Amino acid sequence: MSVELSPLRERVMLYTLMALQFTMILDFMIIMPLSSQLMAVFNIQTAQFGLLVSSYSIAAGISSLLASSLGDSFDRRNALLVSYAGLLIATLACAYANTYELLLAARIIAGFFGGVLSAITLAIVGDIFPQKGRGKAMGIVMLGFPLATVAGVPLGLFIANRYTWHTPFSFLAIAAIGVLFVAYKVVPSVREHLNQPRVNFLQSYVELFSVRNHWWAFATSCLVIFGGFLVIPYIAPTMVANAGMTDSQLPYIYFCGGIGTLITRPWIGRMTDRYQYSRVLTFLIVASFFPIILVTQTLHLSFALQLVISTLFFVVVSGRFIPSSALVTASCEPRFRGRVMAFSSAVQNLGSGFASLIAGIIMVKTPSGEILHYDWVGYIACAVSLLAIYAGTKVKPVS
């Protein structure tokens, strides 16, 4: 371990990084269930809402690429604090944005700092903890994602329904101030990497792309998330506009989906360890077609049935990312792994961003408020997912 910490400070630091991940992920996710409110307030079409979602992801993808080349040039603690402060300011700007253009600008800035922040957080854990304890440490930090899904998004929706769509961003910014203060106190300086020889960025990536297996891994990663994010951002607005659901019912969609994901994630992980990665991915992709098609149809069902369908959607579609990530990790030799994971993260951000944008362009909001062509998006998502199956079979695990 390059930095010696007491056991107590280790735990406090890990839970602080988890809180940091929680606020960062919630900042990204909360915009999606607020869609029906934002589309009404700003009187915008689905394409403009899609740009709100995609702007964050595309900015995060670009900054992830920059982080992979520039991230090793600074003390990781300083980079973490500056990036998180930037995200905090952007979140506060979202809370006070009173026009669509200002909100869009704030989302771009938030995405830029969010993409850098994720890479720096995981790099700090990798630098401080030895291989033996790194998995457990990563597990604690990565709890931020399911907690944001189960607790953060429903709570944010409840707050928005009680007050305005601005309010969740205000609460999030206040919470982030506290996290930033604690991080300043407990995250140590991490500078050992500054003593390592610098690798030419261009030459590094020429070497990375010279391996055909890496290309198939990146294609699989991108196609899986592209297929998911064609559909995910528009569940909330179509449930309200087409299926007759109310804004007050939306939190239950995300709460039940998050609980279902938490319960099934260990099982999917065990299946991924037990069977060939590409086979598990194929099974989950095929299984996801049923909820994707149902979610994207205009079905006037009871709230209970809508809850069952949406929960199944979140469980299976999010479950596809587990064998996909395992495939990417196993596609490269250890010497390439850092670069492969950094580029894969960038590809995923860009893929999710362009998927949201394209789906928003395909759909149209009528004067009566109904959203048309969501079923087309569902069919396209299934077709893209079939391509992901093909790409996944081409990936040869080497480590």
Image: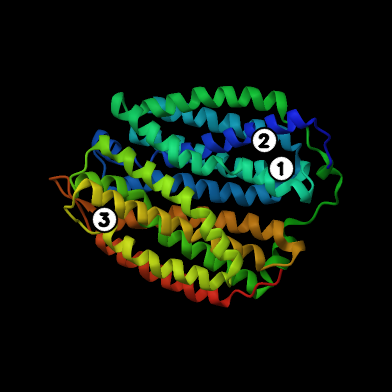
Determine which quarter of the picture holds residue 387. bottom left
Rendering coords of residue 285 (x, y %): 43, 67
Question: How much space separates mark 2 and mark 3, taking CA atoms?
Answer: 42 Å
Identify which residue is drawn at 61% across, 65% down: 273
Give the side of residue 204 with respect to residue 171, left or right. Answer: right
Front residue of 243/59: it is 243
**What is the number of the mark on residue 363?**
3
Mark 2: amino acid: Leu
Q: Nearer the viewer, mark 2 or mark 3?
A: 2
Q: Nearer the viewer, mark 1 or mark 3?
A: 1
Mark 3: amino acid: Met
Determine which quarter of the picture holds residue 38. top left
Q: Quadrant of the C terminus?
A: bottom right
Q: Mark 2 or mark 1: which comes first in sequence?
A: 2
CB atoms of marks 2 and 3 within 8 Å:
no
Rendering coords of residue 48 (x, y %): 32, 46
Give the side of residue 49 with respect to residue 219, left or right. Answer: left
Q: Mark 1 or mark 3: which comes first in sequence?
A: 1
Determine which quarter of the picture holds residue 359. bottom left
Identify which residue is drawn at 74% across, 28% down: 8
Q: Which residue is mark 2?
A: 14
Q: Which residue is mark 1?
A: 125
Colour mode of the rendering: rainbow
| Above or below 16: residue 47 | below
| Above or below 204: residue 396 | below
CB atoms of marks 2 and 1 within 8 Å:
yes
Identify which residue is drawn at 58% across, 33% down: 19
